[in-house]
């Protein structure tokens, strides 16, 4: 447990991609570090990343080269492209009650 790279603090969910990398959503509104940490299946820390708006990542899912992270504070879904070593934010959904918005 801890806040340094490779240490976990408030892990909530994980997903494994087709390259056997484990993506762990961690942190909450009280944490200093809200991020996605990435490990090999052997447990070696590979990288970590976040988005400046992310506040409480509580769920992760992977589909192809896409990583989706739900945020329960922002009522949002963050979409990251993970085909490269450095995941990039493609878009962020927003709160709402209309079709296509998280409520």
Image: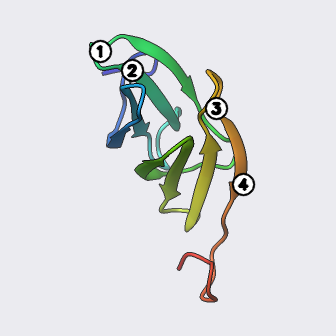
Q: Which residue is mark 4?
A: 91
> Which residue extends farthest bottom?
98
Name the element at disc 4.
strand
Name the element at disc 1.
loop
Callout count: 4
Quarter occupied by residue 95: bottom right
Q: Which residue is mark 2?
A: 39
Label 3 vs 2, first from the N-terminus: 2
Q: CA distance from mark 2 to mark 4?
A: 24 Å
Q: Which mark is residue 87?
A: 3
Name the element at disc 2.
strand
Left or right of 26: which side holds 74? right
Q: CA distance from mark 1 to mark 2?
A: 6 Å
Q: Are marks 4 and 1 in contact (CB under 8 Å)?
A: no
Return the x and y of residue 18 as percentages of the image width and height: 41, 33
Q: CA distance from mark 3 to mark 1?
A: 19 Å
Return the x and y of residue 12 as percentages of the image width and height: 33, 45
Q: Are marks 3 and 1 in contact (CB under 8 Å)?
A: no
How many residues crowd around disc 3 within 10 Å: few (fewer than 14), some, or many (20 or more)?
Answer: some
Q: Are marks 1 and 2 in contact (CB under 8 Å)?
A: yes
Decide: is 29 above or below 84: below
Decide: is 8 above or below 42: below
Q: Name which residue lies at 49% across and 57% down.
A: 70
How many residues crowd around disc 1 within 10 Å: few (fewer than 14), some, or many (20 or more)?
Answer: few
Q: Name which residue lies at 42% across and 25% down.
A: 19
Return the x and y of residue 90 as percentages of the image width and height: 72, 48
Please state which of residues 41 and 101 is positioned toward the viewer in this rendering: 41
Left or right of 46: which side holds 102? right
Q: Are marks 3 and 4 in contact (CB under 8 Å)?
A: no
Label 4 vs 1, first from the N-terminus: 1
Decide: is 44 above or below 76: above
Q: Which residue is mark 1?
A: 43
């Amino acid at each position: 447990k801890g806040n340094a790279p490779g240490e976990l603090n408030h892990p909530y969910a994980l997903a494994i991609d087709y390259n056997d990398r484990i993506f762990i959503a961690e942190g909450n509104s009280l944490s200093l570090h809200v991020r996605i940490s990435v490990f090999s299946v052997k447990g070696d820390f590979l990288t970590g990343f976040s988005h400046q708006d992310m506040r409480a990542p509580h769920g992760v899912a992977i589909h192809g080269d896409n990583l989706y992270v739900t945020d329960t504070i922002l009522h949002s879904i963050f979409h990251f492209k993970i085909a490269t070593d450095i995941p990039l934010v493609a878009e962020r959904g927003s709160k709402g009650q209309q079709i296509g918005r998280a409520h």
